[in-house]
Every structure is written in C-alpha cells, then in structure tokens.
Image (cartoon, rainbow, N blue to C red):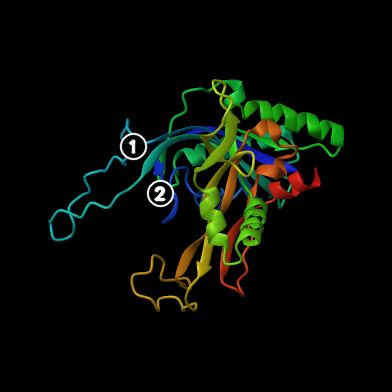
Amino acid sequence: MINHLLVLPRLRIQNANAISSPMTWGFPAMSAFVGVQQVLERNLPDDIKLVFNEIGVVCHHIEPQVTEGGFIKAFHLTRNPVDKSGGTAAIVEEGRSHLEVTLLIGVESEGDDLSSAERRRAIAQTLFDQVQGMRIAGGSVMPAFDTQQRNRPELISFSATESERVKQWRRLKRRLLPGFALVLRDDLLAEHTATLKAQDESATTLDAWLDLSRLNHECLVEQVEDEKDGKEKEVVQWNVRRPYRGWLVPIPVGYGAISDQYDPGEVANARDPSVPFRFVESLYSIGEWVSPHRFQKPDDLMWFVENDLGRGIYRLQNDYANTVTQD
C-alpha cells in the first residue's frame, strides 16, 4: 500500500524515443520512466532522505513525429552530425514523439521529511525543478504552459483512515484527467494462449501475442432469405475480432539474458565499464491503456522492478490485473 505519493504534473517532453523495442513503437517503454525514477533518487539533495519504490505514468497527449496521410507512415528523420573521420554518418531511423505526461512516484522517508505539509511542498517543488533539467525517454523536458494550482507538484501523504484516503485519491484522479495510464495485462496474454492451444496444440505464447497485437478481420457467411423470391442466399460480412474489451497494446516489459554475466571491463565498448555486463533481449507482454478514473487505488497504475537474477530475467511488474481479478 502506498502511503506517500510524489506527483510531478504535466511534464512536456520533446522528441522522446518512440521506438520502444525492436518490435514495438509509439509510447516509450516503461523501463525509460523507471530509469527516470532511479536517476531522480540517486541525485537527491543531501538534505532529502527519500526512497523511491514505484512509478506510474499518465499520458495526456502524444504526437508521434511521422508523415501524415495515407495508410503508411514514416518517421521524420534527422540529419546526424558527421562522424570522427568527417564523413557523413549513416542515417539510422530514430522514432520521436512529443509527450505530455504526469509522473506519480511512490516514496518512503528515511527520516522525518514527510511529517509536515510545508516540508512536503518544498520537497515536491525541489524535485519538480530537478526534473526540468533531465532527459526523459531521450527527450527534453520543456517549460510548462500551465502553472495553475492544479498543475503544481505535490507530495501527498495518504491518511490512515480509509474513508479519508479514498477522498484523497478521488481528488487526485480528477487532476489526472483527461489522460490514460498504461497497465500490465499478463493475464490476458496467458488466457489467450490457452484459448489458441485449445484450438491448435502447436500454438505458442508468441502466436497469442501477435494475435492480440493486430486487428483481425474475419469473414462471416450467413444464410438469409431473399425478400424478392424467398430463396436463401449467402451474405458475407467482415468483422474485426476483438477477444477482449479494452485498449490493448503490445509492450516491452524488460530484458532476458542471452549470455553469461561478464566482469566489469571484460567486454569492449560497454557503456559503463565499472559494472558487470550481460547481453540481453527484450521481453514482451500485453498492456492496456486505462483512464485514471477507473483505478480504485494508486497502486493499480504503479510499475516496479521485479528481477529474477537466477534466470537472468530483468523485468517490470504492475498489479492492475490482480485488482481486476478480485473484482
């Protein structure tokens, strides 16, 4: 249960990375925002003793930088600087998008930082100013247009009383509208895999993931009676098959190891030679975009790290599916 929540509202991000994995594009991967949470925690001022546990993201606006019109779209490419030899660097496709998001970070205090409202306001403003100088998902944070009271940073301490806690969350949800938050739906991927296996034993989780990642147009042939001569005839209808309700999307959720772990500095050209190194590949699942007014508690939209180092699994988790199942 989250007792303290840092709200960094309406961050305008320009040119964020829109290619979130080798197989998906659009909204940046949640791992990018977990990275923001970790950098923000590591760079805390010495007089602020907080621990960041999880992060949620509400997207209010997204504008992919792509060509308009037609069925096929292409990313707007940039002219990259010359390379070390002075020659023209190869153009590598970089998908970019402009975003407006609100970050929600679950925090705990190692001291008495959260004991007074005045101290919480000062911390929230300090961290909000710190975020303004950071890069989020590779994009630049731009100055906010709207500085109204409802769009100012806040560090909320939830009440121990359940009724008051519900009121606080209800007030915060109104601030998050309009927008959508991404949640994890591993449960739907597992259920759809079982459905496909019942039809074909050779079906795999990848088949289920691909089936949920696209629009499946299916042909339905019906026998109807002709109004003119009373004879039966075949009528063909094309429908989009949607096995589950909701706005489902394919998403990357972390990384899986494909090699042993190497000692620091053992692999040439590693980004950071001071830490161990391992080759990995992206892990995928299914996500769902949900409006904030549907969340019963702040935990529903929060993402957190859950690694399985023994299996070489580095992935993110979200508990929204458990809430839906319990309902």
Looking at the image, can residue 237 be seen? Answer: yes
User: What residue is at 60 percent from the left and 73 percent from the top?
Assistant: 311
User: What residue is at 76 percent from the left and 40 percent from the top?
Assistant: 115
User: What residue is at 77 percent from the left and 37 percent from the top?
Assistant: 158
Please tell me in which quadrant of the rendered image residue 249 appears.
Answer: top right
Give the crowd class for mark 1: few <14, some 14-19, many >=20 residues within 10 Å: some
Q: Secondary structure at mark 1?
A: loop
Who comes first in sequence, dot 1 or dot 2?
Answer: 2
Residue at the spot of label 1: 66
> In x, y percent, where is residue 220?
55, 40
Q: Nearer the viewer, residue 190 or 234?
A: 234
Label drawn at residue 19: 2
Amino acid type of the residue that numbered disc 1 sits on in the rendered structure: Val
Q: Left or right? Give the position of 79 relative to 255.
A: left
Q: Left or right? Give the position of 269 relative to 312.
A: left
Give the crowd class for mark 2: few <14, some 14-19, many >=20 residues within 10 Å: some
> In x, y percent, where is residue 48?
63, 47
Amino acid type of the residue that numbered disc 2 sits on in the rendered structure: Ile
